[in-house]
Image (cartoon, grey):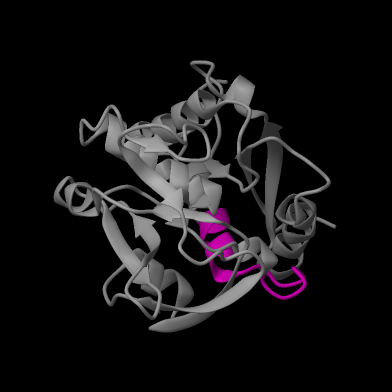
Amino acid sequence: MTTKTARTARVALVGDRSPGVVSHTRIPVLLDALVEHERIVLDAYWIPSEDAGDTDAVRGFDAVWVVPGSPYRSEAGVLAAIRTAREAGIPFLGTCAGFQHALLEYARHVCGLTRAAHAENDPDADDLLIEPLACSLVDHEGRVDIEPGSLARSVIGSERTVERYFCTYGPSRHLDTLRAHGLRFSGHDESGRVRIAELPGHPFFLATLFQPELSDDGSRPHPVVRALARAAVDHATRGERQPA
């Protein structure tokens, strides 16, 4: 139940909603938990990947969350939504496949790596940025070490966390190029493999290979989800919402 003190913002959930994707079924629980624990109402709209490519698909929202559930029906639509959030300063969160596609969008449109590809969508491409992981992370928990002075550290509040994954793909090359063009990799596993990316200078741009949606039972929002909600409210409060 909302209260007079509840703060409201609009969030676009970009992805192909399915009852078979556990993280999708968790999102309504997380939205309810945000109301209970944070007094934040996220007015959420699901935008299928095929619709996300429309010019104004995510404009007018206070946050964009690219959710798990790949392969998306439209890679181009997801990349377009990420690009809009990045260029327009709309708070952005990408989780699991959202993380992978955030890197892909940055590689193509910022770094000039126009042939960079995702193996799940284009397995025969000659420049795979995202490839199958050597060890699957399906239903896996693992430690993530977080760099000091990063957005991720301020959000999670510790130098180390244990997170749950449900993925089989991750970044494999061009990471130095992405770094050189401004993307920061602020979280790594025990072996130094990238698990969190962020974009300094953006109001809020965070992507995680792990799925914060799967943390515990969802009755208390993961710090990453809380941070997105707060960034969305800040965006709404500043009046930066553009006409839908």
Horizontal side of residue 111 vs 117, given as left or right: left
Residue 112 belongs to the span the image colors magenta: no
- Is 96 placed above or below 112 here? below
Nearer to me, 105 or 241: 105
Q: How many marks?
A: 0
Residue at image coords 28%, 30%: 109
Q: Quadrant of the C terminus?
A: top right
Which region shows up in magenta? 215-230
Residue at image coords 58%, 57%: 167
Q: Position of residue 225 (x, y in %)?
A: 58, 61
- Is 86 placed above or below 177 here? above
Horizontal side of residue 199 vs 69, given as left or right: left
Residue at image coords 63%, 28%: 73
Q: Position of residue 141 (x, y in %)?
A: 59, 76
The residue lying furthest to the front in this view is: 124
Q: Position of residue 97 (x, y in %)?
A: 54, 47
Q: Quadrant of residue 84?
A: top left
Residue 220 belongs to the span the image colors magenta: yes
Horizontal side of residue 6 vs 141, given as left or right: right
Q: Position of residue 193 (x, y in %)?
A: 35, 68
From where the camera sits, is residue 158 visible? no
The residue lying furthest to the top in this view is: 55
Nearer to me, 10 or 216: 216
